[in-house]
Image (cartoon, coloured by chain):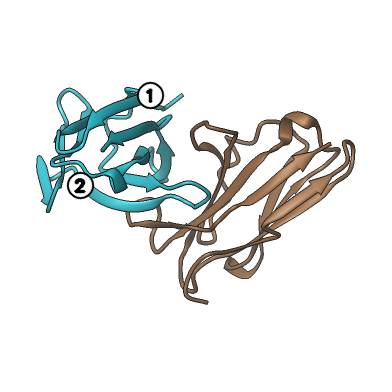
Chain colours: A cyan, B brown
């Protein structure tokens, strides 16, 4: 079936460095790609999203890029801070119903 | 309310018993999802309601799982004859329009089957 693959599963970076998380999707008709951050004991929250009519979107230290031909999209966090430590999920809206399917998550640790 | 509300927040049940989990979505949101998150794992899709369309049940792991959404608002996820492997956090989310707009998540119901 349709799925979303996410890499890496864990990522440890030094404070101030950049972090990149990558996802691939299988449904070429997908056209909405959000990223969510989940802190311990809480539900996921949207941090940035991108639609298929653009290739890149930026919001302060966070950016997302989309390559529709290759069917992959990435999250870039620059100048990482300890409070960026969390689990990050990518997602894609798939098939004609546009239901949201999530990747398996990346646990990001920013070392002070 | 201002956000997605789930109840109960925690539920401990004995193996073999039935449980009902409730989700109150944001008013006016047409799409409602249920996901399951096992300890340290990702978000497993369970079921998706969109407006008055027939729900997409393709993620339900077995026929012990069912869900309904009454009046296009409140949703109930029912697990019959619970098993230990059903222990997880069950998350509900709603979005204004299909999976094309931001999905807002509730805090989840932590289900423990003993």
> In the shown orientation, is residue A63 left or right of residue B87?
left
Q: Is residue A34 visible?
A: no
The disc numbered 1 marks a residue on which chain?
A
The circle drawn on residue B70 is none
- The chain identifier of the residue carrying mark 2 reads A
Could you tell me if residue A108 is visible in this image?
A: yes
- Identify the residue at horizontal 46%, vertical 24% (top origin): A1
**Based on the displayed image, in which of its 4 quarters is residue A69 positioned?**
top left
Q: Is residue B63 left or right of residue B54?
A: right
Which residue was labeled with disc 1?
A9
Q: Residue at x 68, y 50 (%)?
A: B67
**Is A112 in front, or is B10?**
A112
The x, y position of residue B40, in whole percent, is 53, 32
- Mark 1 falls on what kind of element? loop
The x and y percentages for residue A31 are 25, 42
Task: Please give the name of the residue rendered at 80% of the width and 38% of the height, measured from the top-left corner.
Answer: B113
Q: Quadrant location of residue B56? A: top right
Residue A51, disc: 2
Q: For mark 2, give the secondary structure.
A: strand
Mark-to-mark CA distance, 1 and 2: 24 Å
Q: Residues within 10 Å of mark 1 (few under 14, many from 20)?
A: some
Q: Nearer the viewer, mark 1 or mark 2?
A: 1
């Amino acid at each position: 079936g349709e799925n979303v693959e996410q890499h890496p599963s864990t990522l440890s970076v030094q404070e101030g460095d950049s972090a990149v998380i990558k996802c691939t999707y299988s449904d070429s008709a997908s056209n909405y790609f959000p990223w969510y951050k989940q802190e311990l004991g809480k539900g996921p929250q949207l941090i940035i999203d991108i639609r298929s009519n653009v290739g890149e979107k930026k919001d302060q230290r966070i950016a997302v890029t989309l390559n529709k031909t290759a069917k992959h999209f990435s999250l870039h966090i620059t100048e990482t801070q300890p409070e960026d430590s969390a689990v990050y999920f990518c997602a894609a809206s798939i098939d004609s119903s546009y239901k949201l399917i999530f990747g398996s998550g990346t646990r990001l640790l920013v070392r002070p | 309310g201002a956000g997605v509300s789930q109840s109960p927040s925690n539920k401990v049940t004995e193996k073999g018993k039935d449980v009902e989990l409730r989700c109150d979505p944001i008013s006016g949101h047409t799409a409602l999802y249920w996901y399951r998150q096992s300890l340290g794992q990702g978000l497993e899709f369970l079921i998706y309601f969109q407006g008055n369309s027939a729900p997409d049940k393709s993620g339900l792991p077995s026929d012990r799982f069912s869900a309904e959404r009454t009046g296009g608002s409140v949703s109930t996820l029912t697990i019959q004859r619970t098993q230990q492997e059903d222990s997880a956090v069950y998350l509900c989310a709603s979005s204004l329009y299909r999976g094309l707009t931001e999905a807002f998540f509730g805090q989840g119901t932590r289900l423990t089957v003993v």
